[in-house]
Image: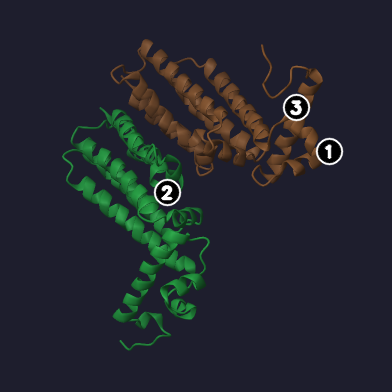
Chain colours: A green, B brown
Amino acid sequence: MTKNMNAPSTRGPLDHSVREQIVDAATEHFGHYGYEKTTVSELAKSIGFSKSYIYKFFDSKQAIGEVICANRLEMIMEVVNSAVSDAPSASEKMRRLFRSLTEAGSELFFHDRKLYDIAAVAARDKWPSTEKHEERLHNLIESIITEGRTAGEFERKTPLDEATQAIYLVMRPYVSPVQLQYNLEAAPTAAALLSSLILRSLSP
Amino acid sequence: MTKNMNAPSTRGPLDHSVREQIVDAATEHFGHYGYEKTTVSELAKSIGFSKSYIYKFFDSKQAIGEVICANRLEMIMEVVNSAVSDAPSASEKMRRLFRSLTEAGSELFFHDRKLYDIAAVAARDKWPSTEKHEERLHNLIESIITEGRTAGEFERKTPLDEATQAIYLVMRPYVSPVQLQYNLEAAPTAAALLSSLILRSLSP
């Protein structure tokens, strides 16, 4: 492949690392100054690149925001999958799913860096990464219910999609960072109480 | 009964009706222009009273907002109590509680007049009316569970306060107008799905 700055499809490893560098710097910058209030000019200045150089790699501020948001959601899913994977039962998987989701969400959008307002915009404007995240969680809940039904841990009368959707709705205020902001303090207790309620609803 | 500290004892029925007139006009004004952005001067102008006349009846804009918020929450509780009172079973009471709460909340804070931002400030600043509202709902949930346990409809193993708190947490995203704004579209479906999940969790 020949390298040509005007043709995005031909961009090679060097450009890839510049993209990463921009995303990392933007994550830090937005984490300090917020996403909504920051302009690409300010971002460029703080990184030490020209605005036009950034526009070679990203079409818009949103394009950078989308990568940051997707990265954070990916990190949350890694934490969740790792917490769930070695649980000894479907019940314990459900508990760990809820706990790890609220912990990772609080950590990655509120404590580590205040990237909450990227999440707010992402939810408001329905960025594809948030929709994909919801779908993955939905699928994970469904697979845990199925596992518990097969093992005889859970009841089998309720239609699978109804049980899945209802449990997802119980978790959603702690999944969506926009809603999580109102539940941050209560989240650890809520995750425990609501997991128990969910498991009571699943008992045969 | 002693009169409110802010209202000297010489104020009679006439003043009472002026207070109501101010609250009604403010409800309409905030419903159009928002609560946060409006000043008492603007409000006075729109009612046709002087600012100092309004201050004879209310210490601050917040004092007016608190009355409006308390009135709305009172209306919600009336709708809820009326929906629940003649239900034939504890299960049906729980369903009606959830449904009427989401319907009345959507109607009274979002559709009828956009008083959502009063609710947002009320929640943020923990106005007494919102705390009282939460407590009343908590008590109502507890009494429905108790009734269902006595009638043999619900299980009795889970500590009553744990079951109550968990069910309250399931409902909260639809009770709090601040969170309800993110759930408005999904609220009717969610109320049905989550009521069923709650009832499965309560089954003996």
Residue at 36%, 35% (x, y): give it: A190
Between the C-alphas of marks 3 and 2, the distance is 41 Å
Left-right relation of A144 to B113 = left
Residue A180 image offset from top left, x and y in percent:
42, 44
Confirm or deny contact between disc 1 and disc 3 (CB under 8 A): no
Residue B3 image offset from top left, x and y in percent:
69, 17
Nearer to us of marks 2 and 1 is 1
Left-right relation of A77 to B11 = left
Residue at 23%, 41% (x, y): give it: A93
The disc at residue B19 is: 3
Instruction: Report whether mark 3 lies on the same chain as mark 2.
Output: no
Q: As shown in the figure, which amino acid type bears the numbered disc 1? A: Gly
Between the C-alphas of marks 2 and 1, the distance is 43 Å
User: In the rendered view of the protein, which quadrant contains the N terminus of chain B?
Assistant: top right
The disc at residue A177 is: 2
The quarter holding residue B39 reads top right
Q: In front: A156, or B55?
A: B55
Residue designated by label 1: B48
Q: Chain of mark 2?
A: A
Q: In front: A175, or A107?
A: A107
Q: As shown in the figure, which amino acid type bears the numbered disc 2? A: Pro
In what element is the residue under mark 2?
Answer: helix
The quarter holding residue A187 reads top left
